[in-house]
Image (cartoon, rainbow, N blue to C red):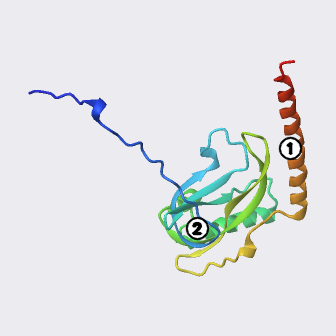
Protein backbone atom coordinates (compact mmCIF):
# COMPACT_ATOMS: atom_id res chain seq x y z
CA UNK A 1 0.00 0.00 0.00
CA UNK A 2 1.35 3.37 -1.00
CA UNK A 3 0.64 6.41 1.19
CA UNK A 4 0.41 9.82 -0.41
CA UNK A 5 1.61 12.99 1.30
CA UNK A 6 -0.98 15.42 2.60
CA UNK A 7 0.60 18.40 0.80
CA UNK A 8 -0.51 20.68 3.61
CA UNK A 9 1.02 23.76 1.98
CA UNK A 10 -1.51 23.56 -0.84
CA UNK A 11 -4.65 23.12 1.24
CA UNK A 12 -6.73 26.17 2.22
CA UNK A 13 -8.81 26.01 5.36
CA UNK A 14 -11.44 28.35 6.67
CA UNK A 15 -11.35 29.71 10.15
CA UNK A 16 -14.11 28.43 12.36
CA UNK A 17 -16.76 31.08 12.40
CA UNK A 18 -17.62 32.28 15.86
CA UNK A 19 -21.32 31.71 16.31
CA UNK A 20 -23.14 34.94 17.02
CA UNK A 21 -25.43 34.59 19.99
CA UNK A 22 -28.67 36.54 19.91
CA UNK A 23 -30.30 37.36 23.22
CA UNK A 24 -33.97 37.65 24.08
CA UNK A 25 -35.24 41.20 24.20
CA UNK A 26 -37.90 42.64 26.50
CA UNK A 27 -41.37 41.34 25.72
CA UNK A 28 -43.54 38.25 26.12
CA UNK A 29 -42.08 35.15 24.48
CA UNK A 30 -42.91 31.46 24.09
CA UNK A 31 -39.81 29.80 25.53
CA UNK A 32 -38.33 26.35 25.99
CA UNK A 33 -36.27 25.61 29.12
CA UNK A 34 -32.92 24.19 27.97
CA UNK A 35 -30.90 23.93 31.16
CA UNK A 36 -30.47 24.66 34.84
CA UNK A 37 -27.52 26.19 36.71
CA UNK A 38 -27.18 27.02 40.39
CA UNK A 39 -24.79 29.52 41.96
CA UNK A 40 -23.01 26.76 43.87
CA UNK A 41 -21.82 25.37 40.52
CA UNK A 42 -19.85 28.56 39.86
CA UNK A 43 -16.23 28.68 40.94
CA UNK A 44 -15.41 31.42 43.46
CA UNK A 45 -18.96 32.84 43.48
CA UNK A 46 -19.59 34.64 46.77
CA UNK A 47 -22.87 36.51 46.09
CA UNK A 48 -26.44 35.63 46.97
CA UNK A 49 -27.42 32.09 45.95
CA UNK A 50 -29.56 31.73 42.84
CA UNK A 51 -31.04 29.30 40.32
CA UNK A 52 -30.82 30.12 36.60
CA UNK A 53 -32.92 28.49 33.93
CA UNK A 54 -31.46 28.76 30.43
CA UNK A 55 -34.20 29.31 27.88
CA UNK A 56 -34.50 29.68 24.13
CA UNK A 57 -37.14 31.45 22.01
CA UNK A 58 -36.98 31.59 18.21
CA UNK A 59 -33.24 30.95 18.29
CA UNK A 60 -32.58 33.66 20.89
CA UNK A 61 -31.26 32.75 24.32
CA UNK A 62 -31.97 34.11 27.76
CA UNK A 63 -32.19 33.17 31.38
CA UNK A 64 -34.72 33.21 34.15
CA UNK A 65 -33.01 33.88 37.47
CA UNK A 66 -34.56 33.04 40.82
CA UNK A 67 -32.93 34.03 44.10
CA UNK A 68 -32.69 31.23 46.66
CA UNK A 69 -34.48 31.53 49.99
CA UNK A 70 -32.06 32.37 52.81
CA UNK A 71 -32.56 32.02 56.56
CA UNK A 72 -31.81 35.74 56.92
CA UNK A 73 -34.65 36.75 54.56
CA UNK A 74 -37.77 38.28 56.08
CA UNK A 75 -40.76 35.91 56.09
CA UNK A 76 -42.46 37.96 53.34
CA UNK A 77 -39.31 37.75 51.17
CA UNK A 78 -39.05 34.00 51.70
CA UNK A 79 -42.70 33.61 50.69
CA UNK A 80 -42.27 35.81 47.58
CA UNK A 81 -39.14 33.92 46.41
CA UNK A 82 -40.86 30.55 46.89
CA UNK A 83 -44.03 31.66 45.12
CA UNK A 84 -42.09 33.13 42.19
CA UNK A 85 -40.20 29.91 41.38
CA UNK A 86 -43.21 27.67 42.03
CA UNK A 87 -45.33 29.72 39.60
CA UNK A 88 -42.58 29.32 36.98
CA UNK A 89 -42.41 25.56 37.57
CA UNK A 90 -46.21 25.13 37.43
CA UNK A 91 -46.35 27.14 34.20
CA UNK A 92 -43.62 24.89 32.80
CA UNK A 93 -45.83 21.87 33.53
CA UNK A 94 -44.16 20.57 36.70
CA UNK A 95 -46.71 18.76 38.92
CA UNK A 96 -44.74 16.87 41.56
CA UNK A 97 -43.25 19.07 44.28
CA UNK A 98 -42.39 16.32 46.79
CA UNK A 99 -38.66 16.87 46.15
CA UNK A 100 -37.38 20.40 45.37
CA UNK A 101 -34.40 19.24 43.30
CA UNK A 102 -36.46 16.85 41.16
CA UNK A 103 -39.17 19.48 40.65
CA UNK A 104 -36.60 22.07 39.52
CA UNK A 105 -34.91 19.64 37.14
CA UNK A 106 -38.28 18.51 35.76
CA UNK A 107 -38.75 21.96 34.13
CA UNK A 108 -35.86 21.33 31.70
CA UNK A 109 -37.23 20.53 28.25
CA UNK A 110 -40.62 22.10 28.97
CA UNK A 111 -42.17 25.19 27.33
CA UNK A 112 -43.94 28.20 28.79
CA UNK A 113 -44.67 31.88 28.13
CA UNK A 114 -42.22 34.30 29.77
CA UNK A 115 -42.25 38.08 30.11
CA UNK A 116 -38.86 39.79 30.17
CA UNK A 117 -38.19 43.44 31.03
CA UNK A 118 -35.11 45.62 30.69
CA UNK A 119 -33.29 47.03 33.70
CA UNK A 120 -30.78 49.89 33.51
CA UNK A 121 -27.89 49.93 35.95
CA UNK A 122 -24.62 51.74 36.56
CA UNK A 123 -21.38 49.79 36.38
CA UNK A 124 -17.72 50.34 35.52
CA UNK A 125 -15.89 49.43 32.29
CA UNK A 126 -13.41 46.70 33.24
CA UNK A 127 -10.67 48.02 30.98
CA UNK A 128 -10.90 51.77 31.61
CA UNK A 129 -12.74 52.03 34.97
CA UNK A 130 -15.10 54.50 33.26
CA UNK A 131 -18.60 54.57 34.78
CA UNK A 132 -21.13 53.37 32.20
CA UNK A 133 -24.87 52.72 32.03
CA UNK A 134 -25.84 49.23 30.88
CA UNK A 135 -29.10 47.42 30.39
CA UNK A 136 -29.89 43.83 31.30
CA UNK A 137 -32.94 41.76 30.38
CA UNK A 138 -34.61 40.12 33.37
CA UNK A 139 -37.33 37.56 34.00
CA UNK A 140 -40.54 39.21 35.20
CA UNK A 141 -43.22 36.49 35.23
CA UNK A 142 -44.58 33.56 33.26
CA UNK A 143 -47.74 31.83 32.05
CA UNK A 144 -48.53 28.38 30.69
CA UNK A 145 -47.41 27.60 27.17
CA UNK A 146 -49.74 29.30 24.70
CA UNK A 147 -51.25 31.40 27.47
CA UNK A 148 -51.39 35.16 27.77
CA UNK A 149 -48.31 36.83 29.24
CA UNK A 150 -48.59 40.61 29.59
CA UNK A 151 -45.82 43.02 28.62
CA UNK A 152 -45.70 46.74 27.95
CA UNK A 153 -42.63 49.00 27.67
CA UNK A 154 -43.65 50.85 30.84
CA UNK A 155 -42.56 47.77 32.81
CA UNK A 156 -38.93 48.40 31.87
CA UNK A 157 -36.85 49.79 34.74
CA UNK A 158 -34.85 52.91 33.95
CA UNK A 159 -32.48 54.84 36.18
CA UNK A 160 -34.13 57.36 38.48
CA UNK A 161 -33.20 61.05 38.41
CA UNK A 162 -31.13 60.50 41.56
CA UNK A 163 -29.31 57.58 39.92
CA UNK A 164 -28.64 59.67 36.80
CA UNK A 165 -27.23 62.50 38.96
CA UNK A 166 -25.01 59.97 40.76
CA UNK A 167 -23.83 58.61 37.40
CA UNK A 168 -23.08 62.13 36.11
CA UNK A 169 -21.01 62.90 39.23
CA UNK A 170 -19.08 59.61 38.99
CA UNK A 171 -18.44 60.13 35.28
CA UNK A 172 -17.29 63.73 35.78
CA UNK A 173 -14.90 62.61 38.55
CA UNK A 174 -13.58 59.84 36.34
CA UNK A 175 -13.12 62.31 33.45
CA UNK A 176 -11.14 64.74 35.64
CA UNK A 177 -8.95 61.96 37.07
CA UNK A 178 -8.39 60.47 33.62
CA UNK A 179 -7.47 63.89 32.15
CA UNK A 180 -4.98 64.49 34.99
CA UNK A 181 -3.39 61.09 34.40
CA UNK A 182 -3.08 61.74 30.64
CA UNK A 183 -1.62 65.21 31.26
CA UNK A 184 0.94 63.80 33.71
CA UNK A 185 1.91 61.11 31.18
CA UNK A 186 2.31 63.75 28.46
CA UNK A 187 4.50 65.92 30.75
CA UNK A 188 6.77 62.96 31.50
CA UNK A 189 7.26 62.28 27.79
CA UNK A 190 8.77 65.74 27.19
CA UNK A 191 12.48 65.65 26.32
CA UNK A 192 13.37 68.69 28.51
Q: Is mark 1 on a helix, strand or loop?
A: helix
Q: Seen from this angle, which residue lies furthest bottom? A: 148
Quadrant placement of the C terminus = top right
Give the percent coordinates (x, y) of residue 86.
63, 67
Give the percent coordinates (x, y) of residue 61.
55, 60
Front-most of residues 19 and 8: 8
Residue 62 placement, left or right of 16: right
Give the percent coordinates (x, y) of residue 97.
57, 65
Disc 2 designates what residue? 89
Quadrant placement of the N terminus = top left
Q: Nearer the viewer, mark 1 or mark 2?
A: 1
Q: Which residue is drawn at 79% across and 44% down?
A: 130
Do callouts 1 and 2 mark residues in contact (Cβ within 8 Å)?
no
The reply to whether residue 85 is visible in this rendering is yes
- Which is more N-terminal, label 2 or label 1? 2
Q: Which residue is drawn at 29% across and 31% down?
A: 8
**From the viewer's perspective, is residue 24 above or below residue 177?**
below
Disc 1 designates what residue? 175
Front-most of residues 99 and 88: 88
Amino acid sequence: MSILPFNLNTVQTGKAKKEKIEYIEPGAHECKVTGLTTSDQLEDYKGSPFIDYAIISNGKVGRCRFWAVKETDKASTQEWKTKQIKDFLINAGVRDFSDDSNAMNDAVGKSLMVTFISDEYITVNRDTSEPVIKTSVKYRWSAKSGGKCTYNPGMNQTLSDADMAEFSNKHASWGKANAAIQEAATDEDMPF
